[in-house]
Image (tube, rainbow, N blue to C red):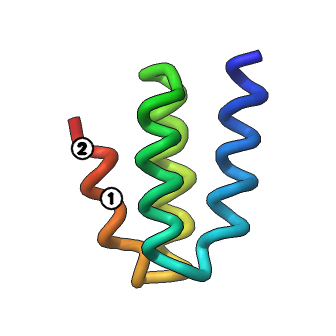
Amino acid sequence: MARAMLEYTKTVLNKVSFDATLFCREVQKAVSRLLPYEIEELKIFINSLVLQNPELNQCLIYLKP
């Protein structure tokens, strides 16, 4: 079940990556819902999105411990 939540989160983040404000809000939700090892995997995914959309860089602050 937890794996499904991570995949769902990735799908949502892909869909809202056009708007940095929405993206940041979804990242905050994801960090509060996912397990610590899933957050590590999510960081890798978000870093790849940031390479494609540099304006999403501001949302990385929500991934810091």
Q: In this view, does 35 lie to the left or right of 16?
A: left
Which residue in the structure is indicated by mark 1? Answer: 60
Mark 1 lies on a secondary structure that is helix
Which residue in the structure is indicated by mark 2? Answer: 64
Q: In which quarter of the image is residue 52?
A: bottom right
On the image, the x and y values in percent for residue 54 come to 42, 82
Q: Do the residues labelled 2 and 1 touch (CB within 8 Å)?
A: yes
Q: Residue 26's mark?
A: none
Which residue is most to the top?
1
Mark 2 lies on a secondary structure that is loop
The structure residue drawn at horizontal position 41% and vertical position 47%, both measured from the top left corner, is 28
Quarter holding the N terminus?
top right
The structure residue drawn at horizontal position 52% and vertical position 68%, both measured from the top left corner, is 22
On the image, the x and y values in percent for residue 12 come to 70, 56
Q: What residue type is labelled 2?
A: Lys
The structure residue drawn at horizontal position 32% and vertical position 59%, both measured from the top left corner, is 60
Residue 16, placed above or below residue 45: below
Q: Residues within 10 Å of mark 2 (few under 14, many from 20)?
A: few
Q: In which quarter of the image is residue 14?
A: bottom right
Residue 1, placed above or below residue 3: above
